[in-house]
Image (cartoon, rainbow, N blue to C red):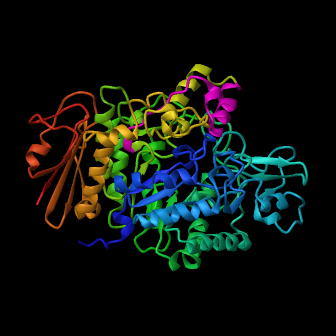
Amino acid sequence: MDEPRAWWKEAVVYQIYPRSFADSNGDGIGDLNGITAHLDYLHELGVDVIWVSPFYKSPNDDNGYDISDYRDIMDEFGTMEDFDRMLEGIHQRGMRLLIDLVVNHSSDEHPWFVESRKSRDNPYRDYYIWRDGKGDAPPNNWGSCFSGSAWQYDETTGQWYLHLFSRKQPDLNWANPKVRDAVFDMMTWWCDKGIDGFRMDVIGMIGKENFDDGEVGPGALYGSFEKSCQHTATTHRYLRMMRERVLDHYDLLTVGEAGGTVEQGIQYAGLDGSELNMIFSFEHNDGLNDGTELGKWSDHGAPLNEFREIMNRWQLGLIGKAWNTVYLSNHDQPRQVSRYGNDGPLFRVRSAKMLATLIHMMHGTPYIYNGEELGMTNICFTRLEDYRDVEVFNAWKQWVESGRVHPEDMMRWFARISRDNARTPMQWDSSPNAGFTTGTPWIRVNGNYPDVNAADEMKDPDSVFNYYKKLIALRHEHLIIVYGNYIPMLNDDPNVYAYRRELDGETLTVCCNWTDRTVPCTLIDEAGGEELISNYRFHKPGLLQPYEARVVLKK
C-alpha cells in the first residue's frame, strides 16, 4: 500500500446541527447538554469524529454562522462548562470533536465591528473591508451569496462594507496582520482546550485580491466576485501561515469548505500537508443546478449521468494527490434521500441504504449528517412563514417580490432544495415533537416521525440505522475501503452506478441501482467473491432490484 495511513483518513465523521439535535431544557432549541445526553447513541453507531456546527455566541441571523464572540457559547446552547463536559464525554468514548472555524466574516455585533463602524480612524476600522461608493452606488457590482448586493452602506462614516453573505455578516479583512494574529490566537485557544480539528467555513474566500466589477451572467442582477475572492493565491498563502502558526502544533483533522475544481482541491488538500487535510467539494450538489441566473432554485433533479461524471472525476482526480471527503447531505443541502433517492413509503429505506452504500465504499472520509442515518426526509413546507432560513427570505424578496418568479414556483423550489429541509429537529422517538423537546420547537418537526425515528430503528435489524452501523464497521475492518484505488465501471449504464476498489491483490466491487425499477446488471455476478453488504436479502442473477446495492470482496 503506497498511501500513508492517518487516523483522519480512516475515520467516519458525524455532523450535528446543534439547534436541531436535542433540547435538554424544554425551550425548543437544541443545546450542548442535549448532545452530551446522546453521545452513547453516536458511539453505538460507530462514528469516530463528531463535528458540531457553530455553537458560539451569536445573534443568529444565519443560525450561528454570524459570530459575535469566538470564545463564548451561545446563550441558547449553554455555557462553557457545558462545552467542557461535552468534550470530555466525547473523549471518554474514544471519539474526537471537530468544531467550525467561521473566519471569513463575523457578526456585525462582534465588538471588532461595533468599533470598526464608529469612525474611519478607529483602531478596528481595518479589521473589515470598507470602501467608498461610486456616487450613490456600491463600490462594485458584486452580488451576495444570500441575494442582493454584497455591499451595505453605513451612514455613520459614509462608506460601504463588504458582506459576501448576509448584511449582518461583514467580511473580515485578512490582509490586516492583526486580524490574522487574532484568528490564530483564537484557534490556539480552542486547540489547547482539547478540540481535535476544524471544519473551515467558506475558507476559500478569505484571500481577496481585488475589488473589480465581476462578470454579470445572463439574466443576473449582480456581478460575480469569484475571480477576485475565491481560490486565490492569497488564500493559499494565508492557509500556509495558519499551518505554520497553529495547525502543525497539534494532531488535528482540518477540512475546508472550499469547493472549486479538482485542480483547486489538490491545492488545498495536497498530500504534502502544506495546507489542509481534506476539502468539501460542492460540484455534485451545485453542479446539478440548471445553469440559470436563479442558481439552485429550479426543478432540476439529479440525473445519474451528470452525478456519476462529477463524482468519478473527483474520485480519480484526487487519488494519490490529495484527500477527499465523501458526502451527500449537510446543513446546507436538502435531505439526501429526498434529493437523490426516493422518499416515498415504498422505497425510502431501500434508497437510503443504496445511497449510503455508494458513498461509504468510496475513496475519502465519509461525512454523515444528523438524521441521515435514519433516512430522514425533506419536510416540504407549504407556507413561507414556516421557514427560518435567511437565504429563503432573501431569495423570496429578490425573485418573487420583484415579479420575476411566480410564488408557486418558488415555494415548490423551496420545498425541494431549501436548507431548512435538513434543519428540522432530529427524530428520536414517536413521542410528541419526536422526543426532540418538551417545549415548542424552533422549527416544525417533520410529521413522519412516528414512522421514522431512532428508537424504533435501533431495535430493527433491517433499519437504515443498523445498515449505517454495518457500513461504518466494514470501513474500520477493511483497508481497501479506505485506501484502495478507484476504478469506474459501467460508465454508460443509464441505471447503475458501479465502481471497483483495488488494494494489495484484493478487489471490491460496488453496484448501485439508481432507479425504482429492476434493471440488468451482471457485474456483481461476474466479479465473484464474498458479499460484504447489500440492502436485499435475496438477489436475482443478472439483475438489480429497485434501489438495490451490492458489494462483494474478492481476495
Which quadrant is home to the N terminus? bottom left
The x and y percentages for residue 30 are: 57, 46
Q: Is residue 398 magenta?
A: yes
* Position of residue 142 in the picture relative to residue 139 (left or right): left
Q: Is residue 18 magenta?
A: no
Residue at 39% from the left image edge and 34% from the top image edge: 452
The correct choice, above or below, for 515 with respect to 116 in the image is above
The image quarter in which residue 513 lies: top left
The x and y percentages for residue 132 are: 84, 54
Residue at 53% from the left image edge and 71% from the top image edge: 194
Q: Which residues are magenta?
A: 373-402
Q: Nearer the viewer, residue 66 or 214?
A: 66
Residue 326 appears in the picture as rendered: no
Which quadrant is home to the C terminus? bottom left
Residue at 48% from the left image edge and 35% from the top image edge: 434
* Position of residue 133 in the picture relative to residue 505 (left or right): right
The x and y percentages for residue 158 are: 89, 52
Residue at 35% from the left image edge and 52% from the top image edge: 45
The correct choice, above or below, for 434 with respect to 101 in the image is above
The tally of labels here is: 0
* Position of residue 532 in the picture relative to residue 7 (left or right): left
Residue 148 appears in the picture as rendered: yes
The correct choice, above or below, for 151 with respect to 178 in the image is above
The correct choice, above or below, for 266 with respect to 59 in the image is below
Q: Nearer the viewer, residue 12 or 313?
A: 12
The x and y percentages for residue 313 are: 35, 52
